Amino acid sequence: MNFKSIAKMDLRRLILALTIASALISLANTLYASYQVQRQQLIDAALERNHAYATKLAASTEDFFDSVQQQLGYAAQVISADFTNMAFLAAETERLFLQTDSFNSIAVIDSRAEVLATSPQTLNLVGKQLQTLGATEAITSRKPLISQPYLSTAGNLVVFISHPVSDVHGNYLGAIAGTIYLKHENFLNRLLASHFYQDGSYLYVVDQHRRLIYHPLNERVGTVVEGNAAIEEVISGVSGKKQVLNSRNVEMLAGYAVVPSSGWGIVAQRPKQATLAALDVLMWRVLLNSLPVAAISLLLILWCARMIARPLKQLASGARTMDNPATADEIQRVRSWYYESAELKKAMLLGIGLLQKNINRLRQDAHTDPLTGLGNRRTLENALQTWEMEKTPFSVVSVDVDFFKQVNDSFGHDVGDGVLRQLAQHMRECAREDDVFCRVGGEEFLILLPRTGLFVAQQVAQRLRQQVERADMVPVHHVTISAGIAHWPGSSPDVARVLKIADELLYQAKRQGRNRVEVHEATLTPP
């Protein structure tokens, strides 16, 4: 009698323990899998965002340098007409200094680096011969120049931007130059300091010698940074993104880009810990919200454990492998001959179905744009990698909605989103089975046409353009699109270059009036 009681008690406790363990393992596995997926998505998104931001600022900085070189070039042309007139030179430098806040000072030097005029005149450099790195380079090279940062005679960390001055016969007279004090207020400093992300991100700029040109902490400007992988890549001319340890051994998610004319590197980064902090809080909330349901489930299992035997043992065995798709078939074969085991069997089958559904949904979300239902950049990258590896030729159609900003400004972003969804539907209607459609930006889309030449791709793009033009997109009524088409490997053997060509042709279509399709000239022949 005692042995039977002990046997029943041990069996009941064993079944209860197995059931509880299986439930907890499944819950932990679900939470862990969800955490890992979301963690990687946050890291990838932060890296991509920082890379895009660094690239944008690098382009803006390059535009700034182009602009100031144009200003100096025009001033050089003006003063070349009367280069020996000191009053005229002084007036022109004063005009250039007051006209723009691009420079902290302006100077005109002759071919021996002697200062002829300056602004502001408080510098007291007129008549002196400059022997600084920037002036020496300007006189030696006799071409438009952006110097590497150096310490001026006044002890300022400066960049010397110069343009040569020549007479009508091409004889070199000297140079006109503007200086930017890196630790002082100026247009470049404000451009780099205009940080639009409020998520803990920050950026800094380094020159070819790893010296900080810009940093949010002004006292760090001028210091040299060693041992940073992102800096090593960007000063070698490589733009990209990666996880790095900064000089203070903090893990950072960095994106970086190169300013071509100066060789500077712009690095935008955010602490990895700050990026993942919100996810940690979210997972704790999920866990806490799951506790009431978990408690109820445990009470139910405890009640069922008094009356179960072999069927529950089989169900508990299956519960340890709920993430295995074959487990559902195994549980379906369990002979649940009483009501309680039959209900538990149904609950487990439902749980497995929901788990597999959530896993599939996570996989789909990772490759789908939530607004339009088209593919995202991950879909684009997977398709390009597969076709390049399989050497499958394809055409790329880069599509952009014309005047989309006016739609958002006039009708609101909800209407703008509706226009994008309707455009995505028109794309699907023009699609073939193997075509890949991706949204890669706000109103920017890419269409990948495998095994398709430029001639057929042009027909597809024109058909889409005409269909969109005729469509009545309430309340906007009518919108148009522009497109650029390139081909791999016909336009270039480099896939990234093909995408860039298509993008450049898209902007060419916009410059030539919009609502049109521009095609790369390579191999444009009927099939």
Image (cartoon, helix red, strand yellow):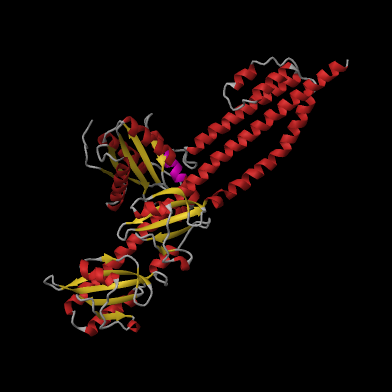
Q: In this view, does 496 lie above or below 94?
A: above
Instruction: Indicate the position of residue 488 as horizontal and vertical percent values.
Output: 28, 37
Q: Nearer the viewer, residue 385 or 159?
A: 159
Reply yes or no: does residue 152 show up in magenta.
no
Q: Is residue 297 above or below residue 314?
A: below
Q: In this view, does 156 lie above or below 315?
A: below
Q: Which of 71 and 238 is in front in this view?
A: 238
Instruction: Indicate the position of residue 9 as horizontal and vertical percent values.
Output: 82, 22
Q: Nearer the viewer, residue 230 or 184?
A: 230
Looking at the magenta stretch, what is its main secondary structure? helix
Q: Is residue 85 visible?
A: yes
* Rendered residue at 51%/34% (across/down): 363
Instruction: Indicate the position of residue 3 as horizontal and vertical percent values.
Output: 85, 16
**Quarter of the image holding residue 304?**
top right
Q: Which of 69 and 25 is in front in this view?
A: 25
Quadrant the C terminus occupies? top left
Q: Can residue 516 be seen in this view?
A: no
Reply yes or no: does residue 420 show up in magenta.
yes
Instruction: Report the label total.
Output: 0
Task: Give the left or right position of residue 335, taking residue 128 as reference.
Answer: right
Task: Give the left or right position of residue 201, taking residue 319 as reference.
Answer: left
**Quarter of the image holding residue 378?**
top left
Quadrant the N terminus occupies? top right
Q: Residue furthest right?
A: 1
Task: Give the left or right position of residue 170, taking residue 20 as reference.
Answer: left
Instruction: Indicate the position of residue 461 as horizontal and vertical percent values.
Output: 32, 39
Task: Give the left or right position of residue 422, taking residue 351 as reference.
Answer: left
* Rendered residue at 37%/53% (across/down): 234
Give the magenta-colored segment's residue range. 418-426
